[in-house]
Amino acid sequence: MKTIVVTGASDGIGAAAARELHAGGHRVIVVGRSPEKTAAVAKELGADHFVADFAVLDQVRELAAALDAACPRIDVLCNNAGGVFGDRAKTVDGFEKTFQVNHLAPFLLTQLLLDKLIAADASVIQTSSFAARMTGKIEMDDLEHDRDFNANVAYGTVKLENILFTKELHRRYHDQGISSAAFHPGVVATGFAAESHSWLRHMYTNPIGRLFMTSPEKGADQMVWLAEGRPGRDWESGTYYEKRKPASRTNPQALDDALAEWLWERSEELLSTGPV
């Protein structure tokens, strides 16, 4: 039995993965933004739960402290929380919301739990997206796309950052026991993009479009597979997966080791100093 923390577990593929992992006999910790939805999923499973809004970094810090206190060990951290949003907006911490919720907050949570994760030879799993390949573009002098903000580009960029974070986490900590992977869940019929003004909102809320989407249960398949699997035997650390296989195509920037290192160091700097 593993202790598995799933963020973004109050709905969608996070909730589906939590149910499947619980059914597999694991201790699942349910983390979500909505108090009502998070409590409902946790009650269904008889699981512990915590509420945190990743648009508020102090709540991420409080979450890390609570998880550290509640869990003698953490075998798997599923960084699943995220989303695409509407017009460009700043969080209370001063960062663009898409960037903070999808990249900076899970980066912070992972760092704060790092000692516990290392002690357990844990796996860290990132829910990325093929949007990294479609619209992702990291501008080193404009990381939050202040000059050319577009909701779809911002989302693709943070999903690219999820892949780079996975690679750099592997490079820095695999020899200390940490394994990492990122995956694309598919186009899943969930409430994704409901808060966005992006064209994606119309696709995800269109009844006809949803007929061609996969179910949350199928979308959660790779998260469950990675969480239950053994790195080095079932999957390779530092890798981005699509359909349980290393992705055959990806954004060229996802292959840039120097960029992955720079993003890590820049993220640490931003968390230390705040936005410039």
Image (tube, grey):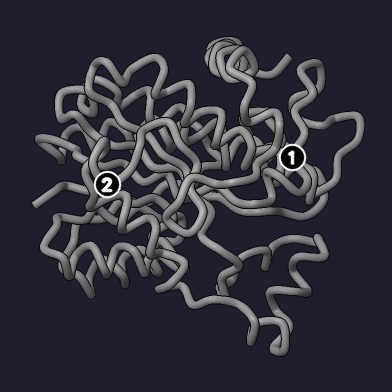
User: Image quarter for residue 40?
Assistant: bottom left
Tag 1 residue: 136
Q: Residue at x 46, y 36 (%)?
A: 106
Quadrant of the rendered image containing residue 201: bottom right
Nearest the viewer among 50 and 105 is: 105
Q: Is residue 14 above or below residue 97?
A: below
Determine contact: label 2, label 1, CB under 8 Å. no
Name which residue lies at 85% across and 30% down. 146
Question: Whole-percent x and y of residue 273?
Answer: 60, 10
Q: Is residue 205 left or right of residue 182?
A: right
What is the residue that sits farthest to the front in this orientation?
248
Q: Is 225 displayed left or right of 85 in the figure?
A: left
Q: In which quadrant is the C terminus drawn?
A: top right
How far apart are the two marked residues, 2 and 1, measured between alpha carbons? Answer: 28 Å
The residue that disc 2 covers is 234
Q: Position of residue 22 (x, y in %)?
A: 19, 65
Q: Secondary structure at mark 2?
A: loop
Q: Is residue 244 visible?
A: yes
